[in-house]
Image (cartoon, rainbow, N blue to C red):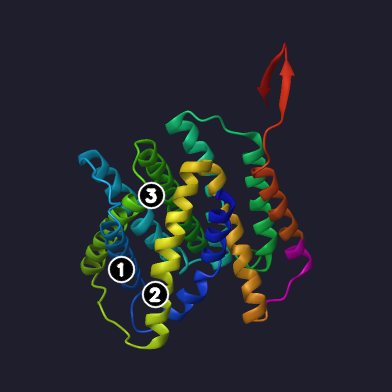
Amino acid sequence: MNLSLYLLTVLIWGTTWIALKLQLGVVAIPVSIVYRFALAGLILFAFLLITRRLQPMNRRGHQICLAQGLCLFCVNFICFLSASQWIASGLIAVVFSTATLWNALNARIFFGQRIAGNVLGGGALGLLGLGLLFWPELSHHAASRETLYGLGLALLGTLCFSAGNMLSSMQQKAGLKPMTTNAWGMVYGAVMLAVFCVVSGVPFSMEWNARYIGSLLYLVVPGSVIAFTAYLTLVGRMGPERAAYCTVLFPLVALNVSAVAEGYQWTAPALLGLVAVMAGNVLVFRKPRARVAEGVVVAK
């Protein structure tokens, strides 16, 4: 079950860039994100109400959902969109892939979980692999104030994503399932982002054509309802540090799709990066060996 959820998350988030690209046009990107999460939240609520799976939440639960919506469905998207004005998408992907390491550190700080050496090693190897994959983009970046701005925003977005992971893990430890918390979090995030758009003077508009509506629906249903539910379920089951390795793998899926759809050419450094990313994945999910000491089985 975990493997299915993991592959589903990686494959969906590895292809959402196509839908995001099709969204570019008349509608401002922040407004498209409002539409995306508002619709996704409403669909989740409708499903949960029809199937009678909507869990009741107390005041604390709603407060955490509000914070989760701010981190996962609002601020991190603003950060990444703003960062894309200063740095290339490849560099953003590399920064975002550090979520594996941040999740391991935050799980240690907030939940007292031991930081597994194989997770840190695998995350670092995956980060190196992404660096090699996107080296052509990275090598063109000079040390400038704009680059530092972009890096700072991408890092802030990654930290918000990691914080959202911790909040979801906290909710699941309290017995709340991701579908319920995502429904509330997405609606809260959409409302806060809508307020941001109004304050910033971003106009609300709509494109009533197959390209925009089709891409929006892909981002709403597979990209949000399914992928976020699958991913945050993994956070609860596998731990936030292992689940976050998805952030290393989905750029790899995106590059393979780009090779077919847009003629992306694999280079020697990129292939070496591919090997590093896959080796990091194996290392992250390697089960700790057990050793026997004085008749007692001890996990390394």
The answer to whether mark 1 and mark 2 are in CB contact below 8 A is: no
Which residue was labeled with disc 2?
217
Say whether marks 3 and 1 touch (CB < 8 Å).
Answer: no
Q: Residues within 10 Å of mark 1 (few under 14, many from 20)?
A: many
Secondary structure found at label 3: helix
Q: What number is the disc on residue 178? A: 3
Q: Is residue 67 left or right of residue 150?
A: left
Q: Position of residue 216 (x, y in %)?
A: 39, 75
Viewer-proximal residue, 114 or 128?
114
State which region is magenta: 264-271
Q: Position of residue 202 (x, y in %)?
A: 26, 73
Rendered residue at 43%/46% (across/down)? 165
Q: Amino acid at mark 2?
A: Leu
- The disc labelled 1 sits on which kind of residue? Leu
Find out whether residue 136 is within the magenta segment: no
> Considering the numbered disc 2 on the image, is that residue within a helix, a strand or a loop?
helix
* Along the line of sight, the residue nearer the viewer: 71 or 299: 299
The residue lying at 43 percent from left, 73 percent from top is 218
Q: Nearer the viewer, residue 74 or 250?
A: 250
On whether residue 269 falls in the magenta region, the answer is yes
Image-quadrant location for residue 37: bottom left
Q: Quadrant of residue 194?
A: bottom left
Picture coordinates of residue 262 (x, y %)? 63, 81
Q: Quadrant of residue 131?
A: bottom right
Estimate the x, y position of residue 272 in percent, counting from the top left: 77, 59
Q: Quadrant of the C terminus?
A: top right
The Cα atoms of the two marked residues, 1 and 2, are separated by 9 Å
Q: Residue at x 27, y 49 (%)?
A: 66
Q: Is residue 143 visible?
A: no
Taking 33 as reference, is 110 above or below it? Answer: above
In this view, which residue lies farthest toward the front?
A: 51
Residue under circle 1?
39
